[in-house]
Amino acid sequence: MIYDVLVIGAGIQGVGVAQALAAAGYSVLVVEQTAPAAGTSSKSSKLIHGGLRYLESFQLGLVRESLQERKLLLELAPDLVKLKQLHIPVYSQTTRSALTIRAGLQLYRALSKFDQDTRFKTLPKSEWGNLGGLKTEGLKTVFRYAEAQTDDAALTRAVLQSATDLGAEVKLGVKFVGAEVSDKGVRVDLRSPLNDLSVDCRVLVNCAGAWVENIISGIQPRPPLPRVELIQGSHLLLPPVIDHYFYLEAPSDRRAIFVLPYQGQLMVGTTEKLHQGAPETAACSQEERHYLLSTLNYYFPHLLYHQDQIESFAGLRVLPKNNQNAFSRSRDVMMSCDNEASPRVVSVVGGKLTTYRATAEQVLAKIRPSLPGATVRGDTRKIKLTPVT
Ligand SMILES: Cc1cc2nc3c(=O)[nH]c(=O)nc-3n(C[C@H](O)[C@H](O)[C@H](O)COP(=O)(O)OP(=O)(O)OC[C@H]3O[C@@H](n4cnc5c(N)ncnc54)[C@H](O)[C@@H]3O)c2cc1C
């Protein structure tokens, strides 16, 4: 049997690609070395968001697309994606003035084509005292706007379930070890605890996230890949000491920090730290822990917690390697293939949880010239996603 497409990785990008290709009528095999969402797709900030902060680096196309996908996911996955009210406090010493934030929120609204879920307001002063003990000294304005929150791993499992409902096959605990590309297709070598096996496919789609370079180095001839680096982002999980959602500016370096109630805990993140070494060694460092806790304490000085109550998790962003700081680098997905006209190998790196479906559509368009005709089985714009029990 020759599969039309073999997808490496059951993170959100891999399962999204599998769903789009299966919906388009192709035979798909997904191989995942551990479990669905075992990589970054269970370690994100869990927001399905337009990305307000990307406006500062003029990533308008990404914000527009993300807002469209957010709207769609709110409709398709109401049990998995829910709107939450975020607060942005502006102080006399905050770098971004109230005027700048208002302009940003207005642009956000315009990019969403004035979708009602992008309406925002400023909170009257009388309500500032009801924000979980937020510091009011020097406070000038508090904006409230909406973003959506999800359980990233549950969303990944739901998309994978949809892909298998559409006919995709999945092999968990199976590792890609190498591949040989020819004019006719790709012979892929896989390893499972039970045996080694080889599988043929017309197109190989590399959605291995932070492991992308390991995959590339196992493919003959070696396909191209943009220069990338791994940037670690850590979150702390505290007891539920605050029950409001915040978007804060870290006083030390002005980066955005989210404070988000999540499944009975308080999630505080994220950081940006160059990661060197194997992807599986990513872990929140003492320095990151201190940075996040001191930001939280700056805004909520009354908070008391015991260090031993603090859990953490860390994920890896795959970002283009350049001289900019990680915060300003493009969050757009990077796609590279061995042959633009009729690709045999496509690597899909970076991007966002929010835009997985749109990314998968782009992958489908890119590889269609290498695939035979097929009978469409569904439209990912219309397929409902439900939690897998
Ligand atoms: C800290 C942080 C916060 C983020 N927050 C948000 C957010 O709030 N909203 C948002 O939209 N986006 C967010 N993102 C981005 C988003 O989480 C990622 O872009 C996305 O999860 C990446 O998914 P992926 O499928 O590419 O990678 P992964 O989820 O890492 O999946 C790759 C998979 O490939 C598998 N694999 C690797 N090698 C092999 C092999 N040899 N054989 C078989 N399988 C293999 C791995 O086991 C893994 O499961 C965040 C990212 C980070 C790092």
Image (cartoon, rainbow, N blue to C red):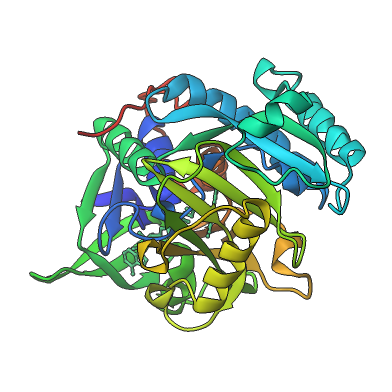
Note whether residue 109 is visible.
yes
- Determine whether, in the image, residue 120 is placed left or right of residue 190: right
In this rendering, would 66 be left or right of 196? Answer: right
Please state which of residues 156 and 117 is positioned toward the viewer in this rendering. 117
- Quadrant location of the C terminus in the rendered image: top left
Q: Farthest residue in the right direction?
A: 99
Judging depth in this view, the residue of 273 and 131 nearest the camera is: 131
Residue 318 is situated, as x and y percent measured from the top left of the image, at 57, 65
Q: Residue furthest bottom?
A: 277
Residue drawn 28% across the image and 59% down it:
32
- The structure residue drawn at horizontal position 64% and vertical position 69%, both measured from the top left corner, is 226
Residue depicted at 62% across the width and 35% down the height: 131
Asked where in the image residue 186 lies, by quadrant, the reply is: bottom left
Q: Is residue 265 above or below residue 182?
A: above
State the image coordinates of residue 25 (x, y, percent, origin top left).
36, 32
Instruction: Note whether 271 is above or below 341 in the view shown.
Output: below
Which is nearer the eye, 168 or 80? 80
Q: Position of residue 262 (x, y in %)?
A: 43, 42
Residue, x 50% and y 77% (percent of image)?
286
Say which of 270 and 354 sits in front: 270
Total labels: the figure holds 0
Horizontal side of 118 relative to 216 (left or right) equals right
